[in-house]
Structure formats: C-alpha cells, structure tokens
Amino acid sequence: MLRSKVFFLHLMKCGGTTLRHLLAEEYPREQIAPVPISPLSKAKPPYPYMNVDAIAHMLSLTPTDIAPYRLVMSHYDWRVTRLAGNEWRLMTMLRHPVRQLLSRYYFIKKARDGHGDEWERTCLNGFHYWLEHHSASYANVQTRLLGLGDVEAAIRNIQDPRMVFGLVAYFPESVQRFNQAFGWSLPTPPRYNKAVVDTDAIELDAETHALAERVQQKDMRLYQVAHRLFFENVLMSDLDM
C-alpha cells in the first residue's frame, strides 16, 4: 500500500507522542525518515522545546535526500517544510496554550526530560511563581515552531493548503480528520506520555490563569484562529458526508 507522504511537526506537550506511536504502526520502518539523536537533542535553554540536532540535520538535506521516505516526524520547526514541496502533506497538533504550558511545567517538575535537578528546582514554588520567573524559554512554543516566533506567519502556515492540523482538546475528532485526509486507519487509544497529573482537569485561580494567558499571548492568538478553523473544517466535512 502506497501511503501518503507526510511531514509531522510535533509540538511539545501537544499530543504528538501518541500520534508518533500510531504512525510507527501505520508506516513500515523503512518508510520513516531517521531522526539523529545525540545529547544535544534534548535541547537546553534557550531552545528547550525542539530537537535542535534533528532540525540542523534536516536543514542540511535536499528534497532528493528525503525522497525514499514517506513519513518525516520530530520536534521540527517550520524551516524544514522547505523540503516538502507540493509532493508532501503537512500535519501538526495544537493545544490550548495555558494547558500546554501547565503540562510542560509538570513534565519539568518530575524531571522526565532528562535535565535532572537543575530544571526540577525551578518548579519548587508552584506554577504561578514558575510563570513569573522561569517560563520565558517555554512560552509561545507553538508560534515559535510554526511561525518562527511570528504569530501572523504561524496563522498563515496552519492555513497552508498542504497542512492538516488537529487540536488536543478534540483528539478523537483530530485523528478522524487525519484519517480522512491521508487515507489512514489510525485508532484513538489513550494518549501516551501524559503528565503525571491530569493537567486538563486542574482548575487554576483567575489570577494565575490570566498570567498564563499573558505569558502565552502569541499562542493564544494562534489557538483562537486554529480553534475556529478546525470547527469550520469539521462542519464542512460533515456537510460533505
């Protein structure tokens, strides 16, 4: 079976690990582009949100280099899409920015990303304090990766004709959308790599929530547009069925 050629831009703490597990079952291993792994791949400040080695590797390639593959996926930013041309499709998942940042906080708090005590200590005084003093390197990650820091560019890019995106808050509907777009048959299992607590169920006080929205101002703008477009596309799909 000839599968769709897809670039998956995996944004951290946006449900991407689950999709990567599913896609690893959907595509034969030889059709999945390898991702370089080294100690630097677990990025450190000021880039603790992307695989810097993998991006550098991809930017050194040409479209001919990736031609043997049908799936490219990692914590890439928009620059790598120059390799895609019109032959490839693009996909990503977005998440409500407050929930995405809260999930990242709990991820760091348990030092699950391999950085140990140095990062874990930044979380000792709670989420509100972390937002005020330690969140700058993690803020607006969705805009940084999809628009290289420019929110209007990120909004244009999620509307690229090649792009299909989903929303973490509507994970089953997003998987269905990917299946329809790419001819896949992905199931909707429980999500992998979730935080040690259910961050979607945590109720933040009004002051902390407002602070998180200010910290994530660009991503809030991006998500508002993405949320509207997602449901416009879902509605259109329903009308076409």
Image: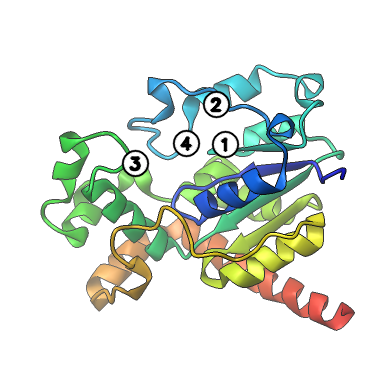
Structural distance between the alpha carbons of marks 2 and 1 = 7 Å
Looking at the rendered image, the disc whose residue lies closer to the viewer, 2 or 3, is 2
Q: Say what amino acid the circle numbered 3 marks.
A: Ser
Residue at 34 percent across and 75 percent down: it is: 201
The answer to whether residue 215 shows anywhere in this view is no
Q: Is residue 221 left or right of residue 198?
A: right
Residue 165 at x, y percent in the picture: 66, 58
Structural distance between the alpha carbons of marks 4 and 2 = 9 Å
Question: In the rendered image, which quarter contains the N terminus?
Answer: top right
Question: In the rendered image, which quarter contains the C terminus?
Answer: bottom right
Earlier in the chain: of badge 3 and badge 1, it is 1
Check whether the beta carbons of the residues at disc 4 and disc 2 lie within 8 A of each other.
no
Earlier in the chain: of badge 2 and badge 3, it is 2
Q: Which residue is mark 1?
A: 76
Residue at 39 percent across and 64 percent down: it is: 99
Check whether the beta carbons of the residues at disc 4 and disc 1 lie within 8 A of each other.
yes
Q: Say what amino acid the circle numbered 2 marks.
A: Ala
Quadrant in which residue 180 is drawn? bottom right
Within-10-Å neighbours for mark 2: few <14, some 14–19, many 20+: many
Check whether the beta carbons of the residues at disc 2 and disc 3 lie within 8 A of each other.
no
Residue 62 at x, y percent in the picture: 76, 20
Residue 132 at x, y percent in the picture: 21, 54
Residue 137, numbered circle: 3
Q: Which residue is mark 2?
A: 54
Residue at 72 percent across and 29 percent down: it is: 30
The answer to whether residue 106 shows anywhere in this view is yes
Q: Say what amino acid the circle numbered 1 marks.
A: Tyr
